[in-house]
């Protein structure tokens, strides 16, 4: 084929996306009116907007053009020549009066359809649409190809649409190709801007970060985007951790899975259980099928999977997390556990532990203990999220209520400390169900903080603190609660209470305890709020002059030093402090203050005239908060990005 157009874009809502494709089709319609028709094949995965693009074309040309549309029958219901019969019937329904061409199969073939189209085109131009050709019978497809080769100079624009499946309607046998001048339009997903346009039709105030997440989750497939927009609270969807697929989308995918052959369905299910990109070799081991690559080929062409080849194997991955999660939910429980069990045998480390949890059916004391040991190891190396994940898995497999609750509360606490509030909020109902007491109040306070309900967080944390006895409660647990209170007081601008809470924490633990630098950080922040940045800096004199020598537990204090130096106009040392914190994100307390270091580093770079460096910091911070960030972080970073673009005249 001599013409190919491959573009991303939207289907659907009037005026949203597909402008280039629509313009190209309108130009081809003009050429057809002049007697120079060119066939068009519109292809793409399910839900991408092929039919709606053609419908938009129809709306534009209908006042001056006769529209003929035929749709291939459902899979399994098509007999030889049935699509051709439908095309002939549609032509006659549109007004063909050639008596020699009956509206049924008595004169099948290209000549019959050509004569009927010629009869219509003698009166005015014709838009001839054949849709869902991936379901068409081979005999009708062969006839359509012969028709297209004989079409000029009729005033007919033929538009044929269908999925781009391998070895199917797009790839005819040798000697029976589509005409050489055929234009093929391959539609891909919506762009971020187009997703934003659709989302704002539902929520005019939707933020850029939410739009980015929606685009990433759905791979820009308009059908998936609309399913999310129709059923979800968009503003809260990505603040509540890993979102579940909308019910309508899950039901639609289940129907598609039922129609798949055993091989492709087994590949989809195994890849969903793996939960991440996997090699063909691994999927062979899980499915027991040697032809995984062949099974995956139609799934890639359908737009469900994507593939890449490295130096050792072919790697398969879901294009959309939404589809992956929907497929995972559709796998029967026994089959899912069996796949997890097989996956655990060919993996190691954290991946193996995840599959062991998926393979188990109920309490398992040995597995829960193994997971808690893994959590301790992850915490010691500063991986708070991994530690939390293992603790929550251990909680789900704990045989007694006490250990289940202890592991749950510690896991959720670590998620909040790691700025993974969305994931922490997934466990809100479990925390609510805990017995009344300081632990429950503390966790509810942290979850309120995760929802940006800072005053409620303060009240709940103070309730938890009042319920703790310094004489009988573990000193580290009480000190940790004091520091959580100090942080919340700082967020509320209450310097005096912040200093008092931080001082209480220091009183409870030895001078060399890892929590002491954090207590001194909040003492400095509270002092700066009450007495100004100079006094705040004096409280940070314990930090090394060279910021690179700061320990991992001193990073929050180093962040405060950089902020206070910036406020005093000491931009070069402020830049040094904040740069160190921004580059050392894989440490235990690196995310406790969100992206405060990056935000202030952007301002320092901006004031130093280093606008390119500021732009890079914003981009890096935006990438970070997609994985772990608070809602205020997103708003702050997008505002900073707007200021930088405006300053550069962009």
Image (cartoon, rainbow, N blue to C red):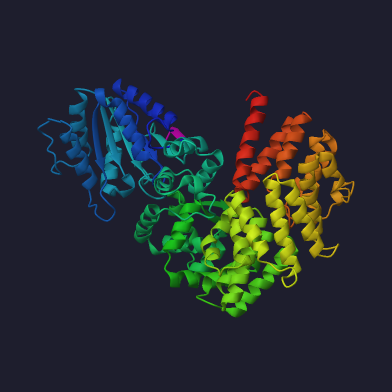
Quadrant position of the C terminus in the picture: top right
Q: Residue at x 55, y 57 (%)?
A: 425
Q: Which quadrant would residue 109 be assigned to in this image?
A: top left
Rendered location of residue 152, percent (x, y): 29, 27
218 is higher (above) or lower (below) than 616:
below
299 and 221: which is toward the camera: 221
Residue 610 visible somewhere in the drawing: no
255 and 231: which is toward the camera: 231
Q: Residue at x 54, y 54 (%)?
A: 241
Q: Which residues are magenta?
A: 1-5
Q: In terms of secondary structure, what is the magenta stretch mainly?
A: strand
Rendered location of residue 126, percent (x, y): 25, 28
Rendered location of residue 370, percent (x, y): 65, 75
552 is higher (above) or lower (below) than 105:
below
Quadrant position of the N terminus in the picture: top left
Residue 69 visible somewhere in the drawing: yes
Q: Residue at x 34, y 37 (%)?
A: 52
Q: Describe residue 49's horizontal placement relative to residue 471 as left or right.
A: left
Q: Describe residue 354's horizontal placement relative to residue 508 as left or right.
A: left
- Is 104 part of what is drawn in magenta? no
Can you name the residue that lies furthest to the top here? 34
**Number of numbered discs visible in the structure rendering:** 0
Can you name the residue that lies furthest to the left here? 99
528 and 546: which is toward the camera: 528
Q: Which quadrant would residue 84 be assigned to in this image?
A: top left
Q: Which quadrant would residue 369 be assigned to in this image?
A: bottom right
430 is higher (above) or lower (below) than 55:
below
Q: Residue at x 87, y 45 (%)?
A: 538
Rendered location of residue 360, percent (x, y): 53, 74
């Amino acid at each position: 084929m001599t013409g190919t157009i491959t573009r991303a874009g939207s289907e659907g809502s009037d005026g949203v996306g597909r402008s280039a494709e629509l313009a190209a089709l309108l130009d081809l319609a003009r050429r057809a009116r002049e007697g120079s028709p060119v066939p068009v094949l519109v292809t793409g995965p399910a839900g991408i907007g092929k039919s709606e693009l053609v419908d938009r074309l129809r709306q534009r040309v209908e006042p001056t053009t006769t529209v003929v549309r035929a749709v291939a029958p459902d899979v399994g219901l098509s007999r030889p020549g049935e699509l051709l019969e439908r095309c002939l019937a549609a032509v006659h329904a549109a007004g063909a009066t050639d008596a020699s061409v009956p509206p049924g199969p008595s004169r099948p073939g290209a000549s019959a359809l050509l004569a009927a189209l010629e009869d219509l085109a003698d009166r005015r131009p014709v838009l001839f649409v054949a849709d869902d050709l991936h379901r068409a019978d081979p005999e009708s497809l062969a006839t359509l190809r012969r028709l297209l080769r004989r079409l000029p100079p009729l005033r007919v624009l033929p538009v044929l649409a269908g999925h781009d499946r391998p070895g199917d309607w797009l790839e005819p046998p040798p000697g029976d190709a589509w005409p050489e001048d055929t234009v093929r339009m391959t539609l891909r997903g919506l762009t971020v801007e187009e997703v934003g346009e659709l989302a704002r039709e539902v929520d005019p105030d939707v933020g850029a970060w939410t739009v980015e997440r929606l685009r990433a989750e759905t791979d820009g497939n308009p059908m998936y985007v609309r399913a999310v927009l129709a059923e979800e609270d968009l503003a809260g969807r990505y603040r509540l951790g890993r979102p579940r697929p909308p019910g309508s989308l899950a039901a639609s995918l289940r129907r598609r899975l039922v129609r798949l052959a055993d091989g492709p369905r087994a590949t989809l299910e195994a890849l969903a259980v793996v939960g991440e990109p996997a090699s063909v070799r691994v999927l062979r081991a899980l499915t027991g099928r040697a032809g995984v690559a062949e099974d995956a080929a139609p799934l890639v062409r359908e737009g469900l999977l994507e593939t890449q080849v490295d130096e050792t194997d072919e790697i398969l991955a879901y294009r959309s997390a939404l589809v992956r999660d929907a497929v995972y939910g559709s796998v029967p429980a026994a089959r899912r556990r069996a796949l997890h069990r097989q996956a655990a045998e060919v993996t190691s480390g954290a991946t193996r532990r995840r599959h062991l949890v998926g393979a188990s059916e109920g309490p398992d004391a040995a597995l829960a203990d193994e997971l808690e040991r893994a959590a301790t190891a992850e915490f010691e190396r500063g991986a708070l999220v991994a530690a939390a994940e293992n603790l929550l898995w251990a909680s789900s497999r704990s045989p007694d209520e006490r250990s289940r609750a202890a592991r749950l509360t510690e896991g959720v606490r670590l998620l909040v400390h790691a700025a993974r509030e969305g994931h922490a909020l997934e466990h809100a109902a479990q925390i609510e169900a805990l017995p009344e007491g300081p632990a429950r109040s503390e966790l509810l306070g942290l979850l309120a903080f995760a929802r940006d309900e800072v005053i409620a967080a303060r009240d709940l944390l103070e309730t938890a603190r009042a319920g703790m006895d310094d004489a009988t409660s573990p000193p580290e647990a009480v000190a940790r609660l004091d520091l959580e209170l100090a942080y919340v007081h700082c967020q509320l601008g209450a310097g005096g209470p912040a200093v008092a809470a931080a001082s209480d924490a220091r009183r409870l633990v030895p001078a060399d305890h890892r929590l002491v630098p954090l207590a001194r950080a909040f003492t400095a922040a509270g002092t700066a709020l009450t007495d100004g940045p100079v006094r705040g800096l004096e409280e940070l004199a314990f930090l090394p002059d060279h910021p690179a020598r700061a320990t991992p537990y001193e990073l929050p204090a180093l962040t405060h030093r950089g902020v206070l130096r910036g406020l005093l106009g000491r931009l070069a040392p402020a830049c040094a402090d904040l740069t160190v914190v921004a580059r050392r994100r894989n440490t235990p307390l690196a995310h406790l203050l969100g992206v405060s270091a990056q935000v202030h580093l952007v301002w320092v770079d901006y004031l130093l005239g280093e606008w390119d460096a500021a732009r890079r910091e914003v981009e890096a911070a935006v990438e970070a908060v997609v994985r772990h960030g608070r809602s205020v972080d997103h708003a702050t970073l997008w505002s900073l990005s707007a200021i930088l673009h405006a300053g550069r005249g962009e």
